[in-house]
Image (spheres, rainbow, N blue to C red):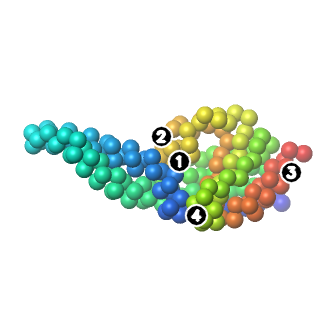
Amino acid sequence: MSASDTAMSIRPVFAASVVLAARLWLAGYIGAVCGAAGQILTTLLYRIDVGVPGFIAFSAIGFMIAPIGILAVAKLNYARTEYRFYPDRLELEQGFFIVREKTIMFRDVKELTLRRGTLQRMCGLGTIDLSTQATDVDAPSPQAAKFGFVPGATSGASVQDIPNPEQAFDTIKKMVDACRR
């Protein structure tokens, strides 16, 4: 097998419960923004001060509607994401509004980690982190990166929400170990 032959290709699995749990903070933020915007617009347009009850009402509406948009954007991102493994590297392409392409050479991988949260385990999914020398441990979460909130300057990669994560982890570990020899 040459270095240009794909050894394995994986696409993430969209599981609404996993996506929402990872992005609940975003729904809260959107709810708060809706509360403030609703209060300001009501005051400016109707000259009515809705006060705290109005803020709470607008926030609740925003918090309840936000998951629909969050799930729609996440579904588009998952549909566009692909992790292609070659004998010497990982090439990933992800995102819908902001497309990010990245190559991680296996010889540069310093640590390989398998993570499986509670909801991921219930759905049979997991995340594999490939850390490189320059990986920033204080880098924002991959979830924030999916929405374009961070620059794509961090090193390493996360292969997120993949099926059969233990089997994929073992295969990737063998590929990384082969490149280290």
Q: In the depicted view, which residue is nearer to us: 11 or 168?
A: 168
For marks 2 and 3, the one nearer the N-term is 2
* Mark 2 surroundings within 10 Å by alpha-carbon count, few (fewer than 14), some (14 through 19), many (20 or more): few
Q: Which residue is mark 4?
A: 13
Can you give x and y, in whole percent of width and height, for residue 109 in the image?
A: 76, 42
* Mark 4 surroundings within 10 Å by alpha-carbon count, few (fewer than 14), some (14 through 19), many (20 or more): some
- Element under label 4? loop
| Three-letter code, disc 3 | Ala
Q: Is residue 125 visible?
A: no
Discs 3, 1 touching: Cβ within 8 Å: no
Would you say 76 lies left or right of 111 here?
Answer: left
In 3D space, how far apart are the residues under numbered discs 4 and 1 (Cα atoms)?
A: 15 Å
Q: Which residue is mark 1?
A: 143
Which label belongs to residue 178?
Answer: 3
For marks 4 and 1, the one nearer the N-term is 4
Q: Which residue is mark 2?
A: 149
| Three-letter code, disc 4 | Val
In 3D space, how far apart are the residues under numbered discs 2 and 4 (Cα atoms)?
A: 22 Å
Residue 102, placed above or below residue 5: above
In the rendered view of the protein, which quadrant contains the N terminus?
bottom right
In 3D space, how far apart are the residues under numbered discs 2 and 3 (Cα atoms)?
A: 35 Å
In 3D space, how far apart are the residues under numbered discs 3 and 1 (Cα atoms)?
A: 30 Å
In 3D space, how far apart are the residues under numbered discs 2 and 1 (Cα atoms)?
A: 9 Å
For marks 2 and 4, the one nearer the N-term is 4
Residue at the spot 50% in from the left edge and 55% down from the top edge: 21
> Which residue lies most toward the left here?
47
For marks 2 and 1, the one nearer the N-term is 1
> Which residue lies most toward the front here?
53
Residue at the spot 65% in from the left edge and 46% down from the top edge: 157
In 3D space, how far apart are the residues under numbered discs 3 and 4 (Cα atoms)?
A: 28 Å
| Three-letter code, disc 2 | Phe
Discs 2, 1 touching: Cβ within 8 Å: no
